[in-house]
Amino acid sequence: MALVTVSGQASDWLVRVRTAGAAYAVRTDGTRVATLTPALDDVSPTGDRVLEKHFGAGTYRIFAARPKGEDRRALAGGGPVLEARWAGDGRHVLYVAVLGGRPQAFRTDAASGVPEPLTNDAEGVRDPQQARDGTLTYLALRSAKAVEESRQLSLDERLAWKGTLDRVDLVTLRDGRSQTVARDLVVYAYGLSPDGRTVAYSTTGRLVIADLDGKHRREFEFGELDPRLTQHAITPIVWRPDGGALLFRATFIGGRSASGGEEVFGDRDCFVLDLASRHVQRFRVETDARVDWIAGEP
């Protein structure tokens, strides 16, 4: 299915671009419309709490607090934790911690701090995400060589190490039933839709969008957008809050050492894919920029 580059506005949604100490809003054609006050990271979907993460040097702590720092509560810590993020309901925090010697997904109520294990996968999981309706998705580790190698590491090293842990199953868990959406793939990034019905994921040179009920599946080749993107993946994948579009960056994975540290095509490119029209808009941002959505005019 071809991607079509277009100009013009698809919606009133804006893209927020954040760099070190600066933030601004752009339209989906890249037109800058406002300078923004640098926003707090990891604000809950309900906007009333902020997630604080303190990782490194043997310290692994997660806190939730009001935006000005009051009502601060410890959610997890003492042992290795990773990949903390808000669940779609804005009340729970997801993270990965070690259970039975393997990384598993947990959920903690931000108000009470009570943890709940969500997975008990035989080899471990990464990157749990949960939609507003409670649908959970995660990447289940499946590379036998990678799993064996990871078992030689300490718990701290195991959670921080990427290594060859590259082949995974993409799994969804809903109403107590699990379903494998994709098997034995190299997945560079994925995103669960806000309504919990669809998942989008990136493999080398390809974006796949699949309904969790198995009825619809779409694949987009990046080479159809630009031949220079055939050795790229997209990461991260950010769903527009209304589910109508995807926002993502391009990451070159074709041997960066050969570039001698110079900028590679895709390093500054940002893409918006409108899911109804299949139109793509591309604009440039700073290499280190993080991008997400904000509604309406700032």
Image: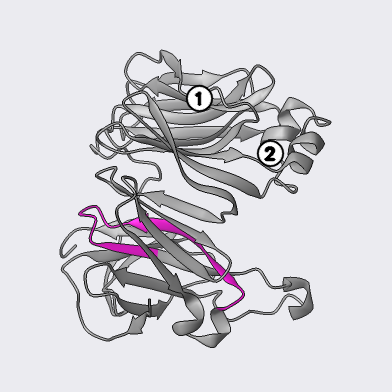
How many numbered circles does the render carry?
Answer: 2
- One can see residue 29 in this view: yes
Q: Residue at x 39, y 79 (%)?
A: 283
**Residue 203 horizontal side relative to residue 144, left or right:** left
Position of 258 relative to 102 (above/below): below
Q: Decide whether the magenta segment is chiefly helix, strand or loop.
A: strand
Q: Quadrant of the N terminus?
A: bottom left
Which of the 4 image quadrants contains residue 116? top left
Q: Quadrant of the C terminus?
A: bottom left
**Which mark, residue 119?**
1
**Residue range corresponding to the magenta coloring:** 230-247
Q: Is residue 111 magenta?
A: no
Position of 291 relative to 117 (above/below): below
Q: Name the residue furthest front.
A: 215
Q: Residue at x 63, y 79 (%)?
A: 264
Whole-percent x and y of residue 10?
Answer: 19, 74
Q: Residue at x 29, y 58 (%)?
A: 293
Whole-percent x and y of residue 199?
Answer: 37, 51
Colour scheme of the rendered structure: one colour
User: Callout 2, which amino acid?
Assistant: Ala
197 or 45: nearer the eye? 197
Position of 168 relative to 104 (above/below): below
Write down the residue under mark 2.
Answer: 160
